[in-house]
Image (tube, rainbow, N blue to C red):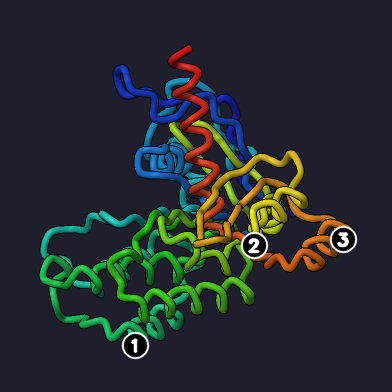
Amino acid sequence: MGTAIEVKNLSRRHRSVAALDDVTVSFEANTIHGLLGRNGAGKTSLMSIIAGQDWPSEGEVRVFGQRPHENEAVLPRMCFVREDQKYMDDAKPGHVFTAASLAYPNWDADLAQRLIEDFHLPMKTKINKLSRGQRSAVAVIIGLACRANITFFDEPYIGLDAAARQLFYDRLLEDYAENPRTIVVSSHLIDEIAPLIEHIVLLDRGRVLVDESADELRERAVTLIGRWDHVQDVIGGREILRREELGRLVRVTVLGGLGADEQARARELDLDIAPVSLQQLVVHLSARQGATLETAKEA
């Protein structure tokens, strides 16, 4: 499929604070990527620079092999919608959608109309008078109907209620199946977006902590539930990410999947084997990285 975005040794500093620190990562074309990380991890900074809306302090970015900044051959092929999306004063949704249709060559008016109906968006109300959920609907309609070659969703759907967010996820998958493109979804709702994403980039304190397929990441850990001595028998020297006491039993999450022999041994010892959710794994890996950095500082 090829690479849509290449980022090499990218840093972005705001005075003494490093929003991004020597980031090297690539995003494959026609893939749904999850860009994950805690608040302040650098997600918005990375997307803003790729989309040509901010400048790096160091390093370089290539989009379709070209520098995106002030590049009229590249910028119209990208769409960046965010939670705090800004609109023209007194604009109504129709004004914004008309502007988007002029800005994006692949704009699909029929899809936009369908989404307007799906989200019950009031078209005659000024955007600054809409509810937070309705403003989120305006943003996601733009992000989907633009059908840009690359679309960044920086949590514009957070204002939607659970049912409306699920509608967004469903429509995204439906349209992506018919019109593949590169989509980067940033979210704190990791388990919600887990069914969408094929590849994960996890940022922590401005650095890349994980850059791999979602399936590979899921296989990096496993949870065992049972007697502690039985769990020890199976996990051997694996690194323990989390241990919880459940009365006389323990629930232990470890790095590394189980082989066929280990799974058979776990069944012999009456251990329950549970998958680790992406959200749990991301939280564990981020906490582990944070503890490592704090230890290094103390040393």
Q: Which residue is mark 1?
A: 117
Residue type (three-letter) at the residue carrying disc 1:
Glu
Horizontal relation, residue 292 to residue 234: left or right: left
Kindly report the distance in space between the C-alpha atoms of the residues bearing marks 3 and 1.
50 Å
Residue type (three-letter) at the residue carrying disc 2:
Gly
- What residue do we see at 48% from left, 21% from top? 295
For the residues bearing labels 1 and 2, Cβ distance under 8 angstroms: no
Q: Position of residue 140 (x, y in %)?
A: 38, 68
Q: Position of residue 202 (x, y in %)?
A: 54, 44
Q: Residues within 10 Å of mark 1 (few under 14, many from 20)?
A: few
- Residue extending farthest to the front is 248
- Residue extending farthest to the right is 261
Of the two numbered discs 1 and 2 on the same chain, state the one appearing first in sequence.
1
- What residue do we see at 83% from left, 57% from top? 262
Residue 260 - label? 3
Q: Position of residue 293 (x, y in %)?
A: 48, 24
